[in-house]
Amino acid sequence: MMQKVDQATVKALELTAPGACTTDAQTLSGKLQSYQIFGAFRGQDREDIWNKLCSINCLIPSLFTFFEDLKYLQAKWRYFVA
């Protein structure tokens, strides 16, 4: 199933919280219904994906924010080690 997830879907989902933010949920719902995200999925798979997305109550991370967080943590680590 992961092979069906395209770059546009990943980009649209990162840094959203569809389970916690009504605006994110509405935006993503529109993109899902118009096949802008998860376009390779059909029927029950799409419904299952949407239900799982709506259960996410925190931000969906991105690789960019992961590496930014890592920079921050490395700087903190150097401070405590020195």
Image: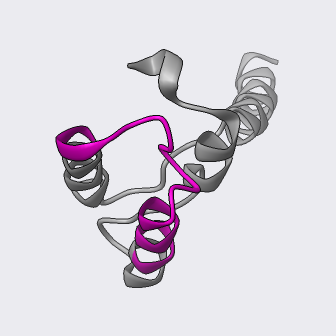
Picture coordinates of residue 4, whole percent (x, y): 50, 24
Where does the image place residue 28, in percent across and percent down from the top left? 47, 66
Q: Is residue 29 above or below residue 52?
A: below
Q: Is 59 or 55 nearer to us in this picture?
A: 55
Q: Which residues are magenta?
A: 26-45
Task: Tell me if residue 60 is in the magenta stretch.
Answer: no
Q: Quadrant of the N terminus?
A: top left
Colouring: one colour
Residue 9 sits in quarter: top right
Q: Nearer the viewer, residue 63 or 75?
A: 63
Task: Judge whether 32 appears above or below 78 on screen.
Answer: below
Left or right of 62 in this view: 33: left
The residue sitting at the front extreme is: 42
Residue 4, above or below 62: above
The residue at the point 69 percent across, 32 percent down is: 63
Q: How many marks?
A: 0
Horizontal and vertical percent position of residue 2: 45, 19
Give the quarter of the figure containing the C terminus.
top right
Residue sitting at x 75%, y 30%: 67
Against 32, residue 21 (above or below) is: below
Relative image position of residue 75 (x, y in whole percent): 81, 30
Q: Give me the residue at 48% from left, 35% from top.
A: 40
**Foreground residue, 42 or 68?**
42
Residue 43 drawn in magenta? yes
Which image quadrant for residue 20? bottom left
Q: Which residue does the image show at 74% across and 16% down from the upper left?
A: 81
Q: In the drawing, does residue 26 fall left or right of residue 55?
A: right
